[in-house]
Image: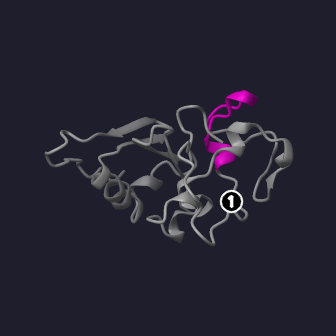
Amino acid sequence: MPSRHDSSGLNRPLVPGRTCGSCTLCCKLLVIETLNKPRNRWCDHCDVGHGCRVYDTRPSECRDFNCGFLTLPQLDEAWLPSAAKLVVGLEAGGHTIFVHVDPDRPQAWRAEPFYSRILDICLPRLYDRIVKTPNGPHNFRPRAWSGPLYVPRPTEG
């Protein structure tokens, strides 16, 4: 349920066997411009842990979004947003991966396997990575197309 900056927008197929299930974390973490819903606040239409109360008439921003857990086979079951406390999204152009972090667990992205996978998934394709936390974004960008990527491991705490 993204803003224009967070749309999956790539018409990626769903990974077979994966569903949202009881996960509704995108309804909290993402901006829904059509509904004037800010980031990091539950949508008024969300029945937390169950789904959307207006599912059949939900805005196109919501209808068009599928998180990375649903569309990226590189992400395993640990990446179910309700468990990981992260929602992965792809920018419409396909060059930026966004990792939205639950403000109730702001360090979740630094834990394994998440930190290493954020880097591993992006390195082969030279994606930009933007991890959005309650304290602001952390940007990881390739230095050069032919050079190595240097991303220091964040310190704990």
Q: Is residue 128 left or right of residue 34?
A: left
Q: Position of residue 51 (x, y in %)?
A: 78, 54
- Image quarter of residue 57: top right
Viewer-proximal residue among 16 and 155: 16
Q: Which residues are magenta?
A: 26-39
Q: Position of residue 120 (x, y in %)?
A: 32, 59
Q: Position of residue 28 (x, y in %)?
A: 67, 44
Viewer-proximal residue among 85 and 155: 85
* In the depicted structure, whether residue 14 falls above or below residue 6: below
Residue at left 51%, top 68%?
Answer: 78
Find numbered disc 1 in the image and state the secondary structure of the residue it sits on.
Answer: loop
* Furthest-left residue in this view: 147
- Image quarter of residue 37: top right
Indicate whether residue 35 is drawn in magenta.
yes
Residue at left 76%, top 37%?
Answer: 59
* In the depicted structure, whether residue 128 falls above or below residue 4: below
Q: Position of residue 42 (x, y in %)?
A: 72, 42
Viewer-proximal residue among 154 and 62: 62
Label 1 sits on residue: 23
Which quadrant: the N terminus? top right
- Image quarter of residue 44: top right
| Few, some or many residues within 10 Å of mark 1 (<14, 14–19, 20+) | some
Please say which color scheme the image uses.
one colour
Residue at left 44%, top 42%?
Answer: 94
Indicate whether residue 135 is drawn in magenta.
no
Q: How many marks?
A: 1
Q: Is residue 69 left or right of residue 36?
A: left
Instruction: Please name the amino acid that badge 1 sits on.
Output: Cys
